[in-house]
Image (spheres, helix red, strand yellow):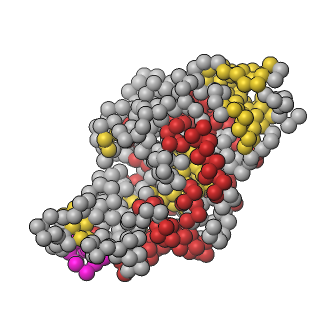
Amino acid sequence: MNSFRPAPAWLADAVFYQIYPQSFADSNGDGIGDFDGIAQRLDHLEWLGVNTVWLNPCFDSPFGDAGYDVADYLNVAPRYGSNDDLAKLVDLAGRRGIRVLLDLVAGHTSAEHPWFRASANDPDDHRYIWAPEGRSGVTPDGFVASPGSRPGAYLPNFFDFQPALNFGYARESSAEPWRQPVDAEGPRANREALRTVMDHWLSLGLSGFRVDMAASLVKDDPDKAETSRIWTELRHWLDRTHPDAVLLSEWGEPEVSVPAGFHTDFFLHFGGPTDGLALRSLWSNGTGTVNETWDPLDCFFDPSGQGSPRPFVEAWQRASSALGDSGFISLPTANHDFSRLNCGPRTAEQLPAAFAFQLTWPTLPAIYYGDEIGMRYIPDLPDTEGSVLGPRYNRAGSRTPMQWDDGPNAGFSTSDHPYLPVDPSPDRPTVAAQRADDTSLLHLVRRLIALRTTTPELGAGGSVEVLHAGYPFVYVRGGRYLVVVNPQRGQASYRLDGIRPGQSLEASGVGIDGDTVTAQGFGFGIFDVSG
């Protein structure tokens, strides 16, 4: 394990809230969310109890991939406002005890970035990965023909308009002379550029970064050893220069990413040897965003009762054992690339049990905007800024406007043409309606966050003992709190051995008779067993 400075103390208590900025709140009526819109809605976040927000990319971009194609790392996209507007948002959030993280796209830029335009016309520029034309004029597999005067082709990182920055290759090959080592001039310049970008924003008050495609830097790096060395180098620099800042990785393999230098990694719908099985085994019900290569599975949070929490529990145990106290694992409800909790046949009544689990498990919870009111994944939307990745994989359905009230566009915008269509359902959930209803999902999520925040045993550092990895899912936190979760439609019981639950801290549909706990369909409960 590398000798990093311990994570900032604030991170252990983080409750993340992910904001897709173009869909959260539009302050100027142009149909696209912006920084001022987020600032005007900070009261909601403060009331909810979240304390750390991360924003999807807001740098200047042609938006071929919703901002993940960066054209300028040091300036924000005008559609969101100015750098000063972002600084004001960070200040206003900080006054409410909310930290703000940015999304850093480290492995590629837009083809419109000045770095790439220069490289496409200069054969001696090695900021990107260039291969010469073959003898027949054919570009190598996976490469894209040069758009400039430079002959040959470049390697993209995702879409063709996202050229991969050159961080070198872990393995060189005489047959492919474009494979530069990681200490070549181009890779060194890109590592320095990452420090420059990070330093720029951290100096303006940001609290860190969620790093996009963090495992993608060094190419042909099968064990990610060389990519890990880059992040280790950057973490040591961060520890020296910005010790209160954090790095979160889009990697999906905490056993590798955290020892490499990240403070936190997410369980994702991809990543690691099981390709994201841990997260998908919880939430993915085969609707919404579906990769055709995924093996079909019955997820645990499904009314059929055919799933199991074991894939998740076992993955968490492996990762947490490897990490020790060196970092954290984060469990999201959803994200901008993956289906919302309320997706397909899943109904609103199934969501409370999901939050009861997510907010009492020893991971850092990450709530995707709108999930706290049960916003639906909206199917069959048009391809918007690169949202469609496959016949069953349309990310737009998870990116629709936040639903604030019953006004035009659900209070998101006064525009006749919002960024994406609002949920057309007449009974779509809204913040205003749920704020007025003490029995709503929103109020439950708020209470669960408050319970977690005021109860160290329920946080990321508290111990967990799994009593029953089935229906109901039963575990004890910190030796003091019994949690019972039954995501299936049918009733389920479990016999407790020597545990006598006392006060109910939060429960719905769970009863205790002697030594047996019984949970009705979609029931959950949190009980104090310290007495």
Where is residue 273 drawn, in percent x and y? 48, 51
In the current view of this chain or complex, which residue is farthest to the left? 136
Q: Is residue 84 above or below residue 414?
A: below
Where is residue 315 drawn, in percent x and y? 58, 46
Q: Front-most of 135 and 215?
A: 135
Taking the magenta stretch, the answer to whether it contains residue 119 is: yes
| Residue beneath the point at 44% across and 76% down | 192
Could you say which quadrant of the image residue 321 lies in?
bottom right
State the extent of the magenta-drawn residues as a range. Answer: 117-126
Q: Is residue 153 above or below residue 286?
A: below
Q: Front-most of 396 and 271?
A: 271
Taking the image as drawn, is residue 414 in sight?
no
| Residue beneath the point at 49% across and 39% down | 280
The quadrant in which the N terminus is found is bottom right
Where is residue 185 drawn, in percent x and y? 37, 81
Q: Label the magenta part by its dominant secondary structure.
A: loop
| Residue beneath the point at 57% across and 57% down | 255
Taking the image as drawn, is residue 311 in sight?
yes
Q: Front-most of 432 and 463?
A: 463
In the rendered structure, the answer to whether residue 107 lies left or right of residue 256 reads left
In the rendered structure, the answer to whether residue 51 lies left or right of residue 386 reads right
| Residue beneath the point at 62% across and 70% down | 2
Taking the magenta stretch, the answer to whether it contains residue 418 is: no
In the rendered structure, the answer to whether residue 377 lies left or right of residue 142 reads right
In the current view of this chain or complex, which residue is farthest to the right? 531
